Amino acid sequence: DTGVSQDPRHKITKRGQNVTFRCDPISEHNRLYWYRQTLGQGPEFLTYFQNEAQLEKSRLLSDRFSAERPKGSFSTLEIQRTEQGDSAMYLCASSLHLKTGELFFGEGSRLTVL
Amino acid sequence: GQQVMQIPQYQHVQEGEDFTTYCNSSTTLSNIQWYKQRPGGHPVFLIQLVKSGEVKKQKRLTFQFGEAKKNSSLHITATQTTDVGTYFCAGRVDSNYQLIWGAGTKLIIKP
């Protein structure tokens, strides 16, 4: 399978705990994005990488959120001291910086904070 | 800030009827993309429009980009049950900027 894969698909945690999500993009894609989506809303941009460089981070993103892409391949998104408001679907997408710019999304990691 | 408004939020249609969703941007866009998200699924890219006044067709789907590059529409002719899902537009002000997503229009087929 050469699509975008995310792990875990579901995570239930207690408020205050830390969680980490992993994304493996399509191998030749140099851009990787993290989005958050809640029910009935469109994806909300969190951050993106070109290769290993984190080029942009949403101003709405709390300091509790951090993302890495250490070797320009897979990426991790960590949420520290989770809050109930963090409950959402976390989507990863990758793209190749060509003229189309289409995003290929993974299945997402659903976070539930109790 | 830059926004993309998408209407309607929901559209209930009988199978075989047409469906249309509209997006309006507060600023001129360099391009606009459309995605479909099936219930429980993830967004899947449908198309990108770049040129002013551009019209593209994919079978029963017709995509338009306005002359001023501030609005776009997706029209589905003779809906089928396989069309069920939420359709999102996402526009880019500049190639160096992130996509600005609409809130989506949910297509619901009446039983």
Image: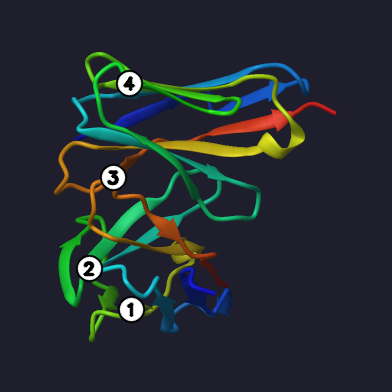
Q: Are marks 3 and 2 in contact (CB under 8 Å)?
A: no
Callouts 4 and 3 on one subunit: yes
| In contact (CB < 8 Å): disc 4 and disc 3 | no
- Which badge, 4 or 3, comes first in the chain's sequence? 4
Q: Are both tags, 2 and 4, on one chain? A: no
Residue A96 x/y as whole percent: 28, 60
Where residue A92 is drawn, which disc sits there?
none
**Residue at 55% across, 49% down:** A39
Residue at screen point 44% across, 65% down: A86
Q: Chain of mark 3?
A: B
- Label 2 is found on which chain of the structure? A
State whether residue B82 is above or below residue A36: above
| Badge 2 vs badge 4, beta-carbon distance below 8 Å | no
- Residue holding disc 1: A75
The local crowd at label 4, few if under 14, some if 14 to 19, many if 20 or more residues have their Cα within 10 Å, is: some
- Closest to the camera, between mark 4 and mark 3, is 4
Can you identify the residue that label 2 sits on? A49
Residue under disc 4 on the same chain as residue under disc 1 = no
Give the camera-side residue of B94 and A42: B94
